[in-house]
Amino acid sequence: MPIDNTDKQILSLLQQDASLSLQQIAEQLNLTTTPCWNRIKRLENEGVISRRVALLNPQKIGLELIAFVQIKTQQHSETWLEEFVLQVKGFAQVMEFYRMAGEYDYLLKVLVSDMRSYDRFYKKLVNNVSGLTDVNSSFAMEQLKYTTELPLS
C-alpha cells in the first residue's frame, strides 16, 4: 500500500497525540473531515495504524528500574520456542522481547519498581523456563531517549 505525504502527516500527528479530533487533524492538513477520515480508516484497515493507546509515565506509577536481560539457550526446537515465548509473554514486566542474532539468543526489556521486584521476576523466569544456559542482566542508570514515534521520512 503506498503511503503518500498526506498519510505521513496524518501518521505523524497521531503519533504525537492520538487524542486529536478528526476536525483538528483535518484543519492542520487543510483537508475536509471526510477525506481525512477515509485516509485514517484506510490506514487502520491496512494495519499501518495498529492501535491507539495512552502512554504512561513509568516513574509516576512506581516503575523505576529498567533491566535488559540477555538470554542464551541450547534449546532451539520449535516446541521449546513456542513454550518459551508463551512463558515470557506471560510476564507483565516484559515490555519488549526479541530473538537475536549474535552472542545472545534473546533480549528482554523489563520494567519493575526496584531490585527486589527484579529479583522476584528473575527467579520466576529461570524457574519457569527450562533450557536457559546463561541469563545476563544489565540495568539502565538513566534513560536518555525514549520515543514511540516511528521515523516517517
Image (tube, rainbow, N blue to C red):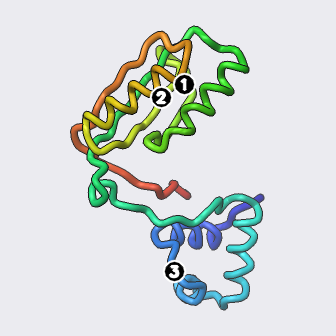
Query: Which residue does the numbered mark 1 point to in the structure image?
Result: 100
Within 10 Å of the Cα at label 2, are there few (<14), some (14-19), or many (20+) other Cα atoms? some
Q: Are marks 3 and 2 in contact (CB under 8 Å)?
A: no
Query: Which residue does the numbered mark 3 point to in the structure image?
Result: 20
Query: Which residue does the numbered mark 2 point to in the structure image?
Result: 107
**Residue 21, position in %: x, y?**
55, 84
Within 10 Å of the Cα at label 3, are there few (<14), some (14-19), or many (20+) other Cα atoms? few
**Residue at disc 1, secondary structure:** loop
**Residue at disc 3, secondary structure:** loop
- Distance, label 3 to label 2, CA atoms, is 35 Å
The residue drawn where x is 64% and y is 69% is: 7
Q: Is residue 152 left or right of residue 137?
A: right
* Foreground residue among 11 and 60: 60
In this rendering, the answer to whether 26 lies above or below 132 is: below
Within 10 Å of the Cα at label 1, are there few (<14), some (14-19), or many (20+) other Cα atoms? few
Number of the label disc, if any, that sits on residue 7: none
Q: Quadrant of the C terminus?
A: bottom right
Instruction: Pick out the residue farthest to the left.
Output: 141
In the rendered structure, which disc, 1 or 2, sits on the residue that comes first in sequence?
A: 1
Q: Is residue 90 visible?
A: yes
Q: Is residue 121 left or right of residue 27?
A: left
Q: Are marks 1 and 2 in contact (CB under 8 Å)?
A: yes
